[in-house]
Image (cartoon, helix red, strand yellow):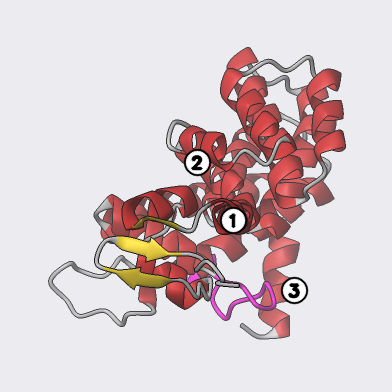
């Protein structure tokens, strides 16, 4: 996409009707993408694989094509490329809404959709400012329903706690919005007390959006769990180690550089030093 085309698209989106047409195309293309991705595990992989290095992929909504046939042989990188294009289009829509100071029902609907979609990709550059704008600017003019307010305040709290690691701010937000949710409260408690057992248990109970936000804390919680095992046990069953770290043994060796020895189904963590 040339700078001229980018500028032209931006100017066109200052028209309110064009914003709505553009948004409808985004929703349609996103639904097509999800249908094309197929199984849940394939869809999760596509979301997880998305990275936007400079925030501006080469494609725009105007270059969207029909989804690839399931019988065809699409390139392996195609799902990520398609999703990257959709994310860019969402960003343009969000920026256009802010530029035109829209806080009407359309702005509310668009922001709800964009925040949910970008949380699934863990693209915080998209969902974090959108969350703040939704709660601070759009909600006072076009009020969220009680269930929507509960949902998005919960996302805000989890993002601050898990991604930013600011538990004091997370509790402050909870108190400010008088927010009550047993699962979100359990996440906060798990983070406060470094309770990896509770953290993994709650992560299996929450919905897909909350799980993606919790994943920001996965590495630190896993590291803490491994340290606890290293200080507590001389050996442990492989299944228990995998459960404690929420990762299989091969991945622990590869990604976490675990140097423990595996003998059958028993992991030797430490050896007693003879005097």
Which disc, if any, is residue 7? Answer: 3
Local secondary structure at mark 2: helix
Do tag 3 and tag 2 residues touch (Cβ < 8 Å)? no
Name the foreground residue: 13 vs 195: 195
Across and down, in percent, residue 207 comes to 46, 34
Do tag 1 and tag 2 residues touch (Cβ < 8 Å)? no
Say which residue label 1 marks.
122
Local secondary structure at mark 1: loop
* Badge nearest the viewer, 1 or 3: 1
Q: Name the residue furthest front.
A: 275
**Number of other residues with Cα within 10 Å of mark 2, as a class: few under 14, some 14 to 19, many 20 or more:** many
Say which residue label 2 marks.
200
> Is residue 169 shown above or below 12?
above
For the N terminus, the quadrant is: bottom right
Write down the region rendered in magenta: 51-63
Name the foreground residue: 35 vs 247: 247
Which disc, if any, is residue 199? Answer: none
């Amino acid at each position: 996409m040339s700078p001229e085309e980018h500028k032209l698209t931006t100017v066109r989106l200052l028209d309110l009707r064009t914003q709505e047409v553009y948004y409808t195309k985004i929703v349609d293309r996103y639904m097509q993408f999800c249908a094309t991705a197929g199984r849940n595990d394939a869809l999760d992989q596509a979301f997880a694989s998305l990275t936007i290095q400079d925030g501006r992929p080469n494609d725009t909504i105007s270059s969207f094509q029909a989804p690839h046939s399931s019988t065809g042989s699409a390139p392996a990188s195609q799902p990520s490329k398609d999703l990257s294009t959709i994310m860019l289009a969402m960003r343009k829509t969000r920026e256009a809404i802010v530029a035109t100071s829209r806080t009407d029902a359309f702005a509310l609907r668009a922001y709800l959709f964009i925040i949910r979609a970008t949380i699934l990709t863990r693209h915080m550059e998209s969902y974090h400012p959108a969350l703040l704008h939704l709660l601070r600017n759009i909600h006072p003019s076009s009020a969220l329903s009680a269930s929507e307010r509960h949902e998005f305040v919960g996302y805000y709290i989890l993002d601050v706690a898990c991604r930013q690691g600011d538990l004091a701010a997370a509790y402050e937000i909870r108190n400010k919005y008088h927010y009550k949710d047993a699962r979100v409260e359990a996440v906060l408690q798990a983070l406060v007390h470094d309770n990896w057992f509770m953290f993994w248990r709650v992560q299996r109970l929450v919905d897909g959006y909350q799980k993606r936000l919790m994943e920001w804390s996965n590495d630190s919680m896993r590291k803490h769990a491994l340290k606890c095992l290293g200080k507590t046990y001389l050996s442990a069953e492989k299944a228990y180690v995998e459960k404690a770290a929420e990762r299989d043994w091969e991945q622990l060796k590869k990604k976490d550089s675990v140097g423990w020895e595996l003998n059958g189904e028993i992991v030797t963590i430490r050896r007693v030093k003879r005097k």
